[in-house]
Amino acid sequence: MSPTRTKLIWIGVAALALRAGAAILTETRPLFPPFYYTDAQRIELLVEQTMAAQKEGRPFVSHATQSQVIQVKTQLALYRLFGPRPLAVKLFHAALGALACVVLGAALLPLFGPGPALAGAALCAVWPSNVFFTSQNFKESPSNLLAYLALWGFLVLIEGAARRAASAVLIGAGVALALTAGAFYRAYTLLILTPAMAAACVLELARRRKASGASTLYLAASLAALALYAPASRWLMGRWTGDKNPGSRALAAHIVPVSWDERARPTSPRGLTEFRRSQLEVDRNWARDNRGREISTQLFPEARFESWLDVAAFLPKGVFHALFMPLPGLYPMEGKIGRVMAGLENLLLLALAGLGVLGALRGPKTSGRVFLMLFFAGMAASAGLLEPDLGSAARHKLLYLPMLFPFAAEQIPLLRR
């Protein structure tokens, strides 16, 4: 076994140990107030209701979204194996979260070499927010793992590491499947990853100045998931909900979030305003109904867009808040331990992100490296415009902010010199 592979395995072991420890600690002594675990408690409630219905021999129909149904089914399967133990679910997610760190490191190797790739994986492994959120019953562990698997396969293809045609075809199919499965948890990742992959393919074709079977495969793999997602979702949800009508509005409500309103599609400035307003309202109502509390960390509920110039002017502020708030001195800490810890973490993330952008601008513009930056930019822009609150932003950035880590790792030796 090569030294690089051995180090990557040890990073995975350390990542698993940290996440398993966090899972055990939060199960025996929760670190944060109950509202930090609201999404996980929602899944637990759905599991209890499903189990009660099964015990009584009656059907249970809920208005859960597709990703929630997958979480419920996964948790029920784990309960059948280990009994109704929430810790088993947390440890399962901890294992997926640790594996995601390893897969990310493996994906970065062809682009950056051992040093920056291993540094990127190690930073993910020890990142406190990553450790916490991927050791709980949230969507982060499976969705991040599937996205990184797709990223790994695509970078293997575009960097020419797959020497045999049969291997390239299998990897291409794996990329499409990983993208589709990841979209079952968060559909918007598919809408951002696939255009980024397609742009990287076009760049590669322009550099080679001719189309080849391999380059056509890269493009097909990156776009196939767009065609697969809708029919695969309808089939999956139809089997689980018993709705056999593919065009059913009830079925569509499981696949597309219920807050998606025909009048509030974010395809125009006013539609974007209405979409944000409806998302924020859903969040507020959920907090009141389930916790009797008001959300104090919503992002710019007063924002209104009349033109695309308004959107462009708002974007830098929105992206900065989604990525780096709260920051000490720029956001009220109010003595809350969660905010203080997040603020200290964000100071380091801000420095790493600055180094990462600098490294991306200075370094070579290969197709794979451009793809990582396109993925980061697309996810950051959508977060800046659509994230409802700081809690959601903190969880979602675990997926895309690590794209900057290897670029930052390349710059650290230069700073030492």
Image (cartoon, helix red, strand yellow):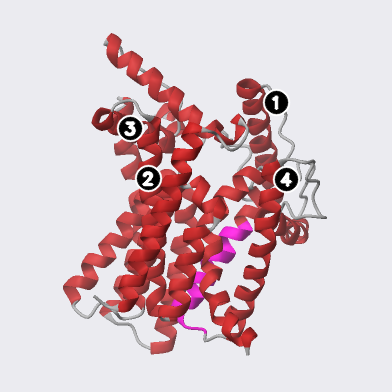
Question: What is the C-alpha distance between the residues marked 4 and 2?
Answer: 31 Å
Relative depth, front residue between 207 and 308? 207
Residue at image mark 3: 73
Question: What is the C-alpha distance between the residues marked 2 and 1?
Answer: 36 Å
Q: Which mark is residue 396?
A: none
Q: Magenta segment, principal secondary structure?
A: helix
Point out the tag, 4 or 1, that comes first from the N-terminus.
1
Point out the tag, 4 or 2, that comes first from the N-terminus.
2
Contact check, label 4 and label 2, Cβ < 8 Å: no
Place of residue 348 in the rendered image (x, y in percent of width and height, measured from the top left)? 66, 64
Residue at image mark 2: 230
Image depth: mark 2 or mark 3 in front: 3
Give the side of residue 193 with respect to residue 319, left or right.
Answer: left
Image depth: mark 4 or mark 2 in front: 4
Q: Is 71 situated above or below 141?
A: above
Amino acid at circle 4: Leu
Q: Is 14 situated above or below 48?
A: below
Give the side of residue 220 with respect to residue 388, left or right.
Answer: left
Mark 4 is surrounded, within 10 Å at the Cα level, by few (under 14), some (14 to 19) or many (20 or more) other residues, namely many
Residue at image mark 1: 293
**Range of the magenta residues?**
365-381
Place of residue 173 in the rendered image (x, y in percent of width and height, measured from the top left)? 26, 61
Circle 3 — which element? helix
Kindly identify the residue that appears in the image at 49 percent across and 28 percent down: 42
Point out the tag, 2 or 3, that comes first from the N-terminus.
3
Question: What is the C-alpha distance between the residues marked 4 and 1?
Answer: 17 Å
Q: Quadrant of the C terminus?
A: bottom right
